[in-house]
Every structure is written in structure tokens, then in C-alpha cells.
Image (cartoon, helix red, strand yellow):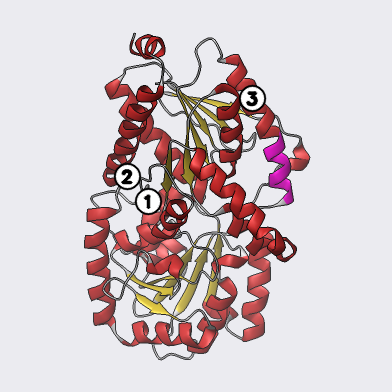
């Protein structure tokens, strides 16, 4: 099986989708090495931007890109759309170059599914739609002026879904959208915890966070980018309402660009809580375990989107108490046994913070419940099982649809 993996992202960068792509490539290469033993069975196409890494069994191809198109941020943007135009022509070049030994399947992440659909129409190569978000919703939530175009974009998204050999959504909400569009076969590929399976956390907060806090001060921790949809405005406003708590809580925010950090630091200053808020900036994923260990309460204040944030799975796995907004983006994974879910507005979220600050026993109980569930459902091994099931089904479908002489050539 020869695979073209389309990932229209900077790769590798330590943020949501690129991390998920890396996990998927490693799992897929591992599966193919066991079942087929082929050398470099996967060609990955990604943006020019990103760290060069080696993944056994994967050849990385990068699109050409002028410097003015560097600095792609999470989510949709005009700069990203321009990169996708270049990505389109780079995909065609790879497909044409491989025409003597064509790709068996295309694994298309996010908007690259439309490129894969066209390739299928021209060259007949089937594709898997790796559905990390609803593209029609993502665009209309980003740009208000595009809302009248939603029916058209939703229609096009449906065509892409129905044209696939299978759809791999990352959460229940996206699975429902795929099935509503008429997905021929749907296999959930949930994001997973980035913590080790044997997850023994050592709480050494001042060393991990570089802060000087007493052992009695609760640390409220957020990890992730600081884009608007993540709800950092909500988080800072809610924290300002609990800053007078007797336990003297401290809010720590990991991630974000310099501009976004300065914007939210100014907001904290305006609200009078800046001395109790620390912005640590970007930190390596390899240290995630240490940061989570240093926290008492983990927060996900997201206010938009229908896909579950990847951080949630590591949050659960850490065994620490979790507070999240009571929205479908969280509800499809979280419940009252493993988290506290609060309204997506400052007073309601502040009430959730107070509930956890007032009750260490509750924090311990939901943390333990969360860790047990994560160990059972949201680990790398669980992901590998789901991915193997997806590709076994796809392989069977592809082989059934191919002419006999092509099947014999593939098996040879």
C-alpha cells in the first residue's frame, strides 16, 4: 500500500494539528512496517515552514514558500489560503511523478480533502478524509462576512465526504456531521493524551514553572494557543473575580505569541489581577507532564468550535481537576464525573473556579476518575487500534474496487 499523506500545515510544530499528524504518521508507518515491510511507504506533503524531523517509514516533501507566507497561525487565514494554492500544485506534481507506481490511497487532512477529491476524479485514487474540523463552520465563525456562503460551503463539504472511501473524524460532533453528509464509512480517530502511559507526576511546581509560590497556593493552569476561540478573555475575566479567594490562587498561562501575551497581560492589568497571573509563553511538549504536575486546577475556557481541544486528553490523563466551558466542544468527551463544566461567561466560570478552590476533595475525586478513563480510552495504543481498523477496512474496500490485474500487481 503506497500512501500520500496530505497535511496542509507547518510541520513539525508543537501545536494541535501538527502534533496529531505526527502521531498518525508514526502509528501508520509502524502498522505498514509490520504488515508489508515496505521501505518508505508514506509520502508526506506539508508546508515549507516547520522543524525537520525524521519519522521512520515516512518521506517528507515540503511545498515551496516565499518568506511572506511564513508564520502560519492556527485556524483559517488569508495567508493559509495562499499556501493552500501552492499546496494544490505541489500535490499534483507528486501524483504525476508517481504515475508509474501510483499511490494506493490519499490520506487528506482538513482542507486538503478538496484536492484529494479532484485527484480522485482525474486519476481515480481513493482518499480518506481526516476530519479535524467542519470547514464550513470554521470559515463562517472566523469571517462574519462569509456567513451567507455557509450553504454553499456546507454543500461542498458534503461532496468531499461522500467522495471519500472513509471519513476519520476526531470527535462525536464531527462524526455526526460526516454521517449527516452521507459518509460511506466512519471511523473515529480521537486525539490522545500526550503523556506517557505510565504517568507518575512529580509535583515540583516552582522548578517546573519558574515561579516562587508557597505550597499552599493553588495553581490554575491553561496550556495552548491564545487565539480568540480558546476563551482567554473569559478565563482572565473569571479569574479576576476569584482573585480575592483566601487560598491566594495563581493563574499560569502556557503558550501564545508575544503579541497575544502582551494583549492579555494588559487585560489582566486593567482588571487588577496581573500580579497573580503568569504568562510563560511557548514551552516544549516534552515538558507538558511537568507543567500539569505543577497544577491544582486545569482549565479549558474555549468559547467556539465543535471539535474537542487536544489538550483535554492530556488534562484528563494527568489526574488533576479539570474545569471547562459547558459547550458541545467539551460535552462530547467530558461529564460531571471527570470534570466541572461551567457556563461560558465570566461569572459562571468564576463560580466553577470557586467550587474547585473550596473543595480539595472534589478536585482529587474527579482527577482520579479522569485519569482512569484516559488510561482506558485516550492513549496512543487506543489510537493505534482505531487507525489499524480504519486502514484494514479501507484496504479491503480499495482491493474490492480495483481491477484484478491491479490487485495482483499490488500484492506482488
Of the two numbered discs 1 and 2 on the same chain, state the one appearing first in sequence. Answer: 1
Q: Nearer the viewer, residue 65 or 261?
A: 65
Where on the picture, by quarter, is residue 114?
top right
Of the two numbered discs 3 and 2 on the same chain, state the one appearing first in sequence. Answer: 3
Please name the residue that numbered disc 3 is placed on: 92
Alpha carbons under labels 1 and 2: distance apart: 7 Å
Task: Answer whether residue 182 is magenta in the image.
Answer: no
Q: Is residue 249 left or right of residue 369?
A: right
Image mark for residue 383: 2
Where on the picture, by quarter, is residue 145?
bottom right
Report if residue 150 is visible in the image: yes
| Residue at x-position 39% and y-position 34% | 26
Q: Is residue 63 above or below residue 79?
A: above
**How many numbered discs sit on the rendered protein?**
3
Secondary element at tag 1: loop
Q: Main secondary structure of the magenta part?
A: helix
* Viewer-nearest of discs 1 and 3: 3
Q: Which residues are magenta?
A: 78-85
Of the two numbered discs 1 and 3 on the same chain, state the one appearing first in sequence. Answer: 3
Task: Point out residue 100 in the picture as x, y percentages from the top left corner.
Answer: 53, 9
Please name the residue that numbered disc 1 is placed on: 190
Q: Nearer the viewer, residue 376 or 277?
A: 376
Amino acid at each position: 500500500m503506497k500512501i500520500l499523506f496530505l497535511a496542509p500545515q507547518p510541520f513539525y510544530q508543537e501545536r494541535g494539528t501538527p502534533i496529531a499528524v505526527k502521531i498518525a504518521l508514526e502509528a501508520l508507518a509502524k502498522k505498514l512496517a509490520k504488515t508489508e515491510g515496505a521501505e518508505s511507504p508514506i509520502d508526506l506533503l506539508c508546508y515549507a515552514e516547520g522543524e525537520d524531523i525524521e519519522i521512520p517509514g515516512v518521506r517528507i516533501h515540503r511545498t515551496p514558500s516565499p518568506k511572506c507566507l511564513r508564520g502560519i497561525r492556527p485556524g483559517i487565514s488569508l495567508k493559509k489560503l495562499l499556501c493552500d494554492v501552492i499546496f494544490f500544485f505541489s500535490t499534483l506534481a507528486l501524483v504525476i511523478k508517481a504515475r508509474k507506481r501510483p499511490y494506493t490511497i490519499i490520506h487528506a487532512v482538513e482542507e486538503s480533502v478538496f484536492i484529494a477529491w479532484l485527484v480522485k476524479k482525474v486519476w481515480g485514487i481513493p482518499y480518506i478524509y481526516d476530519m479535524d474540523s467542519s470547514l464550513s463552520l470554521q470559515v463562517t465563525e472566523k469571517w462574519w462576512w462569509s456567513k451567507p456562503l455557509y450553504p454553499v460551503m456546507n454543500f461542498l463539504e458534503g461532496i468531499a465526504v461522500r467522495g471519500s472511501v472513509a471519513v476519520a473524524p476526531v470527535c462525536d460532533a464531527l462524526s455526526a456531521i460526516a454521517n449527516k453528509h452521507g459518509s460511506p464509512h466512519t471511523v473515529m480517530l480521537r486525539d490522545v493524551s500526550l503523556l506517557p502511559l505510565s504517568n507518575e507526576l512529580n509535583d515540583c511546581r516552582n522548578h517546573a514553572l519558574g515561579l516562587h509560590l508557597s505550597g499552599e497556593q493553588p495553581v490554575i493552569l491553561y496550556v495552548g494557543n491564545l487565539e480568540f476561540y480558546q476563551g482567554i478573555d473569559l478565563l482572565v475575566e473569571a479569574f479576576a473575580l476569584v482573585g480575592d479567594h483566601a487560598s491566594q490562587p495563581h493563574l499560569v498561562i502556557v503558550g501564545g505569541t508575544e503579541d497575544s501575551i502582551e494583549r492579555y497581560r494588559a487585560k489582566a492589568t486593567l482588571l487588577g489581577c496581573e500580579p497573580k497571573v503568569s504568562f510563560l509563553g511557548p514551552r516544549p511538549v516534552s515538558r507538558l507532564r511537568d507543567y500539569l504536575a505543577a497544577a491544582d486546577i486545569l482549565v479549558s475556557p474555549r468559547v467556539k468550535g465543535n471539535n474537542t481541544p487536544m489538550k483535554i486528553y492530556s488534562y484528563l490523563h494527568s489526574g488533576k481537576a479539570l474545569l471547562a466551558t459547558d459547550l458541545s466542544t467539551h460535552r462530547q468527551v467530558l461529564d460531571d464525573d471527570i470534570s466541572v463544566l461551567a457556563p461560558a461567561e465570566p461569572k459562571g466560570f468564576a463560580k466553577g473556579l470557586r467550587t474547585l478552590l473550596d473543595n480539595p476533595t472534589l478536585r482529587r475525586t474527579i482527577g482520579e476518575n479522569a485519569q482512569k478513563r484516559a488510561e482506558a480510552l485516550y492513549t496512543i495504543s487506543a489510537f493505534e487500534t482505531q487507525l489499524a481498523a480504519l486502514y484494514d477496512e479501507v484496504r479491503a474496500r480499495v482491493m474490492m474496487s480495483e481491477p484484478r490485474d491491479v490487485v495482483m500487481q499490488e500484492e506482488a
